[in-house]
Image (spheres, helix red, strand yellow):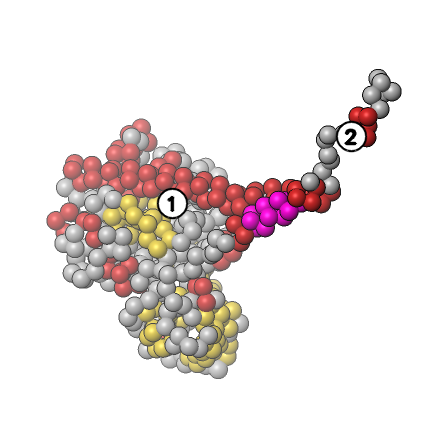
């Protein structure tokens, strides 16, 4: 066969790629992938953020359904004295319990015994609640020495004033023994924050106790976000905590002090956090929001002449 | 023929590189300054603690940890030019043990704030950041009561 047509060897119509051409092609493909990858990651984060916003909407709806049934929003917590902060001997109930029936968690709600504090009924509390987890963050457990607890943290915090756990300065819709009536929200429900995102800090076996993200514990800096600090700030929270600035969780360990503790809203979304307003709408608050605007939005009847930046 | 193909290739590659380089990076929508400095309590460097900068007018809040009397905030996280109030807090173990609310049945050590209220809750520390100075260097000399 070869000898039949010797011409074909000399005048091959096909021409090969040179090494340089091949390298250029590979380089171009590399550049294209490098271009595409961040876009793909951004699209995935956008999808997660949407899911995260949807969860907040569910919580907003549940709060409004609670309001329809009880005439007010659920209390921020029951069991701590709103004047002194003392909890000694009281039956303590966190916010999350009150809202369970409106999140289709009736079974869990029925398990909960209101004649006991949350920490005395490990079977009823601490279960994973999908609606409280933002897919952009990592779900974490609070480890307990007894190991009878399966206490999951969460990503959605109540707006708790402008300063510390005990000192809101200007009342926000949630406080100890208090959940606002819509009539109390004189700044307008679309101008008043109800919830904001927080991050779940690691507190596994062997880790120091870090309260941030504990939705089943009514104590300070667990699920209460203060507008003392703007979102995603590099300024540390004040809490019983471990300082983890590399994870976006800076903190000063106060040992857990109701008169000193405050926690900033934080998220894994680039550029800011998502917030739930009292009218049930969800918005994105930039981390470069002016502090005075952020604080004005957290008060329910502050009469500040501010508009939310997203309006 | 081969020469021509090389030219096409070179043009194509240059074009793609340009596309790769063109998309710029978005910046922060507020003007910020970097700030660092020292904190002493009664002349001694403050071992640990937190410093906050809260705007009196417009601007975001800023802050960071104090370690061995020093603190530093990068410009990307810093305050805006303008008037700010500084708040400094530091906690210390007291040795007193109380029942642990987070770990029922166990004890925990009480921690105490050691900085007077005039440097935090009712702070008199005022700072003005100006836009033209790149990185501010601030000394804070605190006195205990």
Instruction: Tell me: B63 left or right of A62.
Output: right
Across and down, in percent, residue A114 comes to 27, 38
Residue identifier under label 1: A155
The magenta segment is B6-17
Farthest residue toward the right? A3
**Disc 1 chain ID:** A
Tell me if I can see residue A83 in this picture.
no
Question: Closer to the camera, A62 or A34?
Answer: A34
Q: Is residue A141 above or below residue B116?
A: above
**Disc 2 chain ID:** A
Q: Is residue B8 magenta?
A: yes
Question: Closer to the camera, A29 or A297?
Answer: A29
Q: Quadrant of residue A118?
A: top left
Crowding at dot 1, Cα within 10 Å, few <14 / some 14-19 / many 20+, comes out as many
Across and down, in percent, residue A184 comes to 14, 51
Farthest residue toward the left? A183
Q: Secondary structure at mark 2?
A: loop
């Amino acid at each position: 066969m070869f000898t039949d047509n010797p011409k074909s060897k000399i005048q091959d119509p096909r021409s090969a790629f040179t090494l340089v051409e091949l390298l250029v092609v590979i380089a171009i493909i590399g550049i294209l992938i490098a271009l595409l990858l961040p876009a793909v990651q951004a699209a995935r984060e956008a999808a997660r953020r949407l899911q995260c916003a949807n969860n907040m909407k569910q919580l907003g709806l549940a709060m409004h359904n609670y309001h329809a049934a009880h005439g007010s929003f659920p209390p921020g917590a029951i069991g701590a004295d709103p004047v002194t902060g003392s909890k000694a001997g009281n039956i303590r109930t966190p916010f999350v319990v009150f809202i369970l029936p409106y999140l289709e968690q009736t079974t869990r709600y029925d398990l909960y015994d209101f004649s006991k504090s949350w920490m005395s009924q490990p079977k009823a509390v601490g279960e994973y609640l999908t609606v409280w987890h933002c897919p952009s963050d990592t779900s974490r457990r609070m480890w307990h020495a007894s190991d009878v607890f399966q206490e999951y943290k969460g990503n959605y915090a109540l707006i708790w004033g402008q300063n510390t756990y005990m000192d809101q300065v200007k009342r926000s819709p949630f406080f100890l023994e208090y959940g606002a009536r819509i009539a109390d929200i004189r700044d307008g429900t679309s101008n008043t924050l109800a919830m904001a995102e927080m991050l779940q800090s690691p507190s596994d076996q062997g880790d120091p106790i870090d309260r941030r993200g504990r939705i089943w514990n009514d104590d300070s800096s667990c699920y209460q976000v203060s507008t003392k600090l703007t979102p995603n700030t590099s300024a540390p929270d004040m809490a019983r905590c471990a300082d983890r600035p590399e994870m976006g969780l800076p903190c000063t360990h106060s040992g857990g002090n109701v008169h000193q503790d405050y926690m900033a809203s934080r998220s894994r979304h680039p550029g800011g956090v998502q917030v739930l307003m009292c009218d049930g709408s969800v918005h994105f608050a930039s981390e470069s929001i002016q502090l005075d605007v952020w604080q004005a939005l957290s008060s329910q009847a502050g009469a500040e002449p501010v508009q939310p930046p997203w309006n | 023929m081969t020469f021509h193909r090389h030219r096409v290739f070179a043009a194509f590659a240059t074009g793609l590189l340009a596309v790769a380089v063109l998309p710029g990076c978005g910046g922060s929508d507020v003007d910020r300054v970097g700030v660092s400095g020292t904190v002493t309590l009664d002349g001694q460097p403050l071992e640990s603690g937190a410093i906050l900068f809260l705007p009196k007018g417009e601007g975001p809040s800023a802050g960071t940890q104090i370690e061995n009397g020093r603190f530093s905030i990068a410009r990307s996280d810093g305050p805006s030019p303008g008037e700010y109030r500084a708040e400094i807090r530091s906690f210390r173990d007291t040795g007193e043990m109380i029942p642990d609310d987070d770990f029922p049945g166990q004890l925990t050590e009480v921690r105490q704030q050691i900085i007077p209220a005039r440097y935090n809750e009712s702070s008199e520390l005022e700072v003005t950041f100006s836009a033209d100075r790149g990185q501010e260097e601030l000394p804070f000399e605190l006195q205990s009561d």
